[in-house]
Image (tube, rainbow, N blue to C red):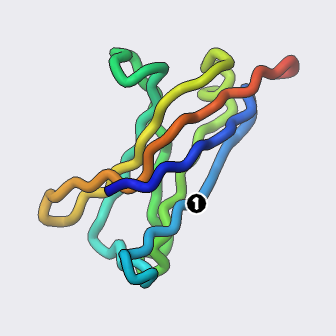
Amino acid sequence: MAIYANLVVDQGTDFSSFVTLEDTSGAIVDLTGYTAAGMIRRTYLSTSSTSFTTSIPDPTSGEIKIQLDATTTGAMKAGRYVYDLEITSSGGAVSRVVEGQLEVNPGVTY
């Protein structure tokens, strides 16, 4: 089951955040052999989407880095979106690990 976390992004700026995965006992999840993918939509039913750039810099740390560049956030209208982040094992099993709302704060200079 995914954890729920809200994110705030400033329009027209670079955004990055780390997500650290732990199991139910609080131990760090080893992400060796996993890939990550994340998507943002205006609503769950929207057909258009924006993808996070994702990476797992050190798989044994359990950390996933999610990023949006300034061009991407500048193209997003201010307001509330929904997002999720999934991991895929080397065997192809997909798990949703984080989901929530993403708020884009309007910007004047971008």
Q: In the picture provided, is 103 more to the left or to the right than 61?
A: right
Where is 69 relative to 37, above or below?
above
What residue does disc 1 label?
18
Q: Residue at x 62, y 42 (%)?
A: 7
Q: Amino acid at mark 1?
A: Phe
Where is 19 relative to 103, above or below?
below
> In which quadrant is the N terminus drawn?
bottom left
Residue 15: x, y in percent?
A: 67, 43
Q: Residue at x 43, y 20 (%)?
A: 43
> In which quadrant is the C terminus drawn?
top right
Locate residue 107: give its quadrant. Answer: top right
Residue 97: x, y in percent?
A: 38, 56
Numbered disc 1: secondary structure: strand
Locate residue 93: give its quadrant. Answer: bottom left
Q: In the picture provided, is 110 more to the left or to the right than 40?
A: right
Residue 49: x, y in percent?
A: 42, 23
Kindly give the residue lying farthest to the left in the view shown: 91
Q: Residue at x 49, y 45 (%)?
A: 53
Locate residue 78: give its quadrant. Answer: top right
- Sort mark 1 into few (<14), some (14-19) or many (20+) by Cα contacts within 10 Å: some
Residue 82: x, y in percent?
A: 48, 31
Label tally: 1
Q: Residue at x 25, y 57 (%)?
A: 88
